Image: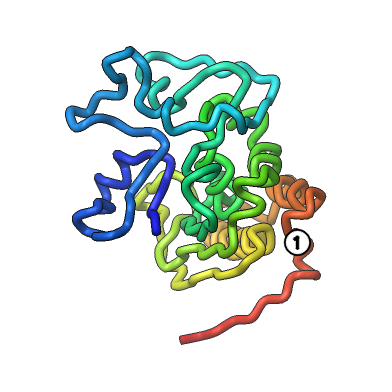
Amino acid sequence: MMIWDRREMQLHETGYTEDNYPGIKIKGTECQDAQGGFINKDGKFYSEDRIDKKCYFFADVEGEYDAYTMPYMVNGGKNSYFTKICTEDVTKIINVPVLKNAGSAVTLCLKNLAFGAITNTGRLHQQLWHETCAYACAFSPLRDKVVLNIVDGLIGCFDGGPSANPQFMCNYNTLLVGSDPVAVDRIGHDIVIAKRIEEGIQVKDKPEAIRFMHLAEELKLGIADRNNISLTEFNV
C-alpha cells in the first residue's frame, strides 16, 4: 500500500510519514532532500526521476515559471508529464478528495486526480481548467486504475476554496463514496452550491460550473446528468 499525493513534503508536514504509518510507503511526485533542497548534485530536480516522460498530457499553452515556482511544476513547456506513481508504482487507486469549492465550481474527484497526477499544471488553471479535469482523467494511468472515490465531507469549505480559509469552512458531516468520479462530483457539487446559496454567496447554480463533468461524460468516464445518477443515502 502507498499513500501518495502531488507533494511529498506536504504529506510529511501533515503527519503522513512512514514512522506514523509503518509498512506503508509515503510518496509524492514533487520532493526534496533532507535539507529541503529540490536539486540534486547533477543540477536536476529530484522530482524529474519521478515523472514518466513516455506518458504526457499535451496542451498548446506554454508553462513559464519563476525560480520559486518551478520546483512545484517540475517542468515548463507544453507537456504535463504523469507521475510514475500512477504509471508504474500502483495498480489500483482510491481517490480521497475533500468536499470544497473553487468559485462556483468544485474541486473533488476529477480535479484531484487530474491536477494531482501531472506536472506543469500552473499553465492549465486559467485557460484549460475544465478540459484538464476531464481529459487528463481519460489517460490510462487514471482511467484504468481508479476503483473508488471517497470524498471527505466531514469538514469542507464553501467559499475561498480550494484553499483552506477558516471563515468559510463548515461541517458538511458527509462522506460521498462511489466508483464513478463524475457522478460523485455532481452530487458533491449540489451539496456545495446549496451551501453557497444558503450563505448568500450566489443566487443560483451556474450551468457552466459543471462543464468539466459534461466533458468527462462525453469521454465515458461517468455520469454527469443528475437524473441518471443513482444515490443511496445512509444517515448514521
Q: Position of residue 71 (x, y in %)?
A: 38, 24
Q: Nearer the viewer, residue 34 or 129?
A: 34
Numbered label tally: 1
Above/below status of 44 relative to 140: above
Q: Nearer the viewer, residue 65 or 169?
A: 65
Q: Is residue 146 left or right of residue 230?
A: left
Location of residue 124 (image quadrant): top right
Residue found 27% across the figure and 50% down from its top: 14
Q: Position of residue 199 (x, y in %)?
A: 52, 59
Q: Secondary structure at mark 1?
A: loop
Above/below status of 144 relative to 231: above
Name the residue furthest bottom.
Answer: 236
Residue found 53% across the figure and 48% down from its top: 112
Q: Which residue is mark 1?
A: 223
Q: Is residue 228 left or right of residue 166?
A: right
Q: Is the residue marked by circle 1 packed among few (<14), some (14-19), or many (20+) residues within 10 Å?
A: many
> Quadrant location of the N terminus?
bottom left
Residue found 53% across the figure and 55% down from its top: 91
Above/below status of 231 relative to 79: below
Q: Position of residue 212 (x, y in %)?
A: 71, 46
Q: Amino acid at mark 1?
A: Ile
Q: Position of residue 18 (x, y in %)?
A: 24, 53
Q: Nearer the viewer, residue 80 or 169?
A: 80
Location of residue 39 (image quadrant): top left
Q: Is residue 39 left or right of residue 173?
A: left
Residue found 52% across the figure and 45% down from its top: 86
Q: How is the image coloured?
A: rainbow
Location of residue 54 (image quadrant): top right
Q: Nearer the viewer, residue 33 or 197?
A: 33
